[in-house]
Amino acid sequence: PLMRLPWLDPRDDNQPFPHPDRALAEPDGLLAAGGNLNPRRLLRAYRLGIFPWYSSGQPILWWSPDPRLVLFPERVKLARSLRKTLRKGLFAATADTEFAAVMAACAEPRGAMPGTWITPDMHRAYCRLHRLGHAHSIEIWHQGQLAGGLYGVAAGRVFYGESMFSRISDASKVALVLLAAQLRRWDFALIDCQVRTDHLLSMGAVEIPRTTFLELLQHHCPLPGRDGPWRLDDDLLADLLAPSPP
């Protein structure tokens, strides 16, 4: 399929992306190749519902799958077992304090999967976005050590989740529920989860048609967002654990 894809000129950040409707059905969502990972191009891609995903040795590949997995912050599911974990107070949480370390942890090999799509170029590009105030991380700590976390990109009132990791059971789930709780307070509309995983479905994520996803982006990306370093509210955990109103 690479031969049939539109190719983007790496020297021209202003070259438009093809419309997501032109993405391939197989592999699902593959839209274009080439270009670069400059902040301007990356931010434009996210606002259009497009993200880069490729392995070392491949050209940059751009995707916009259909359907799209999203999590509405107010609909995140807090399982009883996770609630119990949170009550124990084993974890501490921060935002935007160790972005590069979270990315590096997400890039570590997992089980039988030796490779990673978080190439050194990707790592550099997103750390740059972070320094510019557009990419953010949630860190989960256990006894002073980084135990889990996630990172992604914010545009307007949309957060595009990129990857998460756990070194201790439940740490990435804690990161996700805290992120959702914070984004709910900031009136964010949705968390993009990209593609279906059972893990995310169990936490309340749902698949929606790409056309619906793009409509949501058109409405919520132009709204004023939260640039610059993020900080989690101190009472977030207490709020999460408060009994639901009858």
Image (cartoon, rainbow, N blue to C red):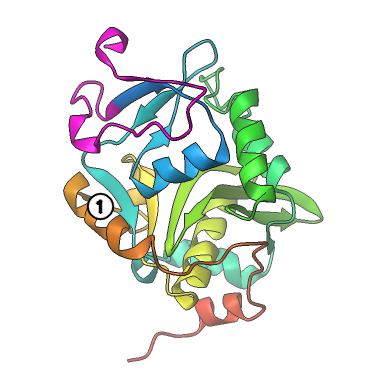
Is 107 positioned to the left or the right of 218 in the image? right
Q: Name the quarter where the N terminus is drawn.
A: top left
Image point (53%, 63%), residue name: 179
Q: Taking 113 as reference, is 140 above or below it?
A: below
Instruction: Give the image location of residue 115, x and y in percent.
Output: 55, 18
| Secondary element type, mark 1 | helix
Image point (18%, 36%), residue name: 21
15 in magenta:
yes
Image point (56%, 27%), residue name: 110
Q: Amino acid at mark 1?
A: Phe
Residue found farthest to the right: 144
Q: Quadrant of residue 20?
A: top left
Characterize the magenta stretch by its predominant secondary structure: loop
Residue found farthest to the bottom: 246
Q: Name the quarter where the C terminus is drawn.
A: bottom left
Instruction: Give the image location of residue 177, x and y in percent.
Output: 49, 63
Taking depth in this image into account, of 13 and 30 the one nearest to the observer is: 13
Instruction: Give the image location of residue 35, x and y in percent.
Output: 46, 24
Taking depth in this image into account, of 8 and 136 the one nearest to the observer is: 8
Residue bounds of the magenta highlight = 1-30
Q: Taking 211 as reference, is 62 above or below it?
A: above
> In the rendered image, which residue does mark 1 sit on?
213
Q: Taking 8 as reference, is 133 above or below it?
A: below
Is 220 positioned to the left or the right of 209 in the image? right
57 in magenta:
no
Q: Quadrant of residue 118?
A: top right
Is residue 167 something that shows in the picture? no
Taking depth in this image into account, of 200 and 28 the one nearest to the observer is: 28
